[in-house]
Image: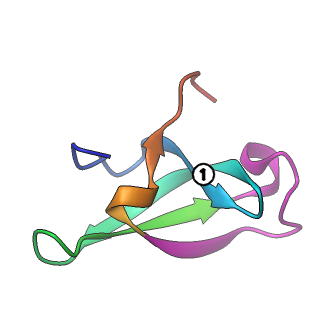
Amino acid sequence: MTATPAVGEIVTVPWGVGTVRGKVVEVYGLAGRRQVIVELAPELSGHVVDEPTTVAFPLASVERADVPA
């Protein structure tokens, strides 16, 4: 991702051999090493997770979701 996502924005992140949707809750780190914390919830992730959880990804691994959730 070239632009930093906003907190609350819906994004897709790598998960297994595909991707899953989640919501950005925090962006941190210095330029070139930025990390994005994404909340995965059952409703938004297509029930890939059973309970809400957060996961950190490098900014380059995060993509804006094409369709609003």
Q: How many labels does the image show?
A: 1
Classify 55 as above or below 12: below
Mark 1 = which residue? 22
Q: Which of the 4 image quarters holds residue 48?
A: bottom right
Q: Quick check: 16 left or right of 19?
A: right
Q: Position of residue 37 (x, y in %)?
A: 44, 69
Residue at horizontal 76%, vertical 64%? Answer: 16
Q: Quick check: 1 left or right of 56?
A: left
List the single residue furthest toward the top: 67
Q: Which of the 4 image quarters holds residue 35?
A: bottom left
Q: Quick check: 55 left or right of 57?
A: right
Classify 5 as above or below 28: above
Q: For this rendering, which residue is in front, 19 or 67?
A: 19
Residue at horizontal 42%, vertical 42%? Answer: 9
Q: Position of residue 44 (x, y in %)?
A: 72, 45
Q: Residues within 10 Å of mark 1 (few under 14, many from 20)?
A: many
Quadrant of the drawing holding the C terminus = top right
The boundaries of the magenta stretch are 41-57
- Please check the rendered image and state whether residue 55 is part of the magenta-colored stretch, yes or no: yes
Q: Where is residue 13 in the image (x, y as percent from the top left)?
A: 57, 54
Q: What residue type is labelled 1?
A: Gly
Classify 47 as above or below 55: above
- Please check the rendered image and state whether residue 4 is part of the magenta-colored stretch, yes or no: no
Q: Quick check: 44 left or right of 67?
A: right
Q: Element type at marker 1? A: strand
Residue at horizontal 82%, vertical 55%? Answer: 42
Q: What scheme was used to colour the molecule?
A: rainbow
List the single residue furthest toward the left: 31
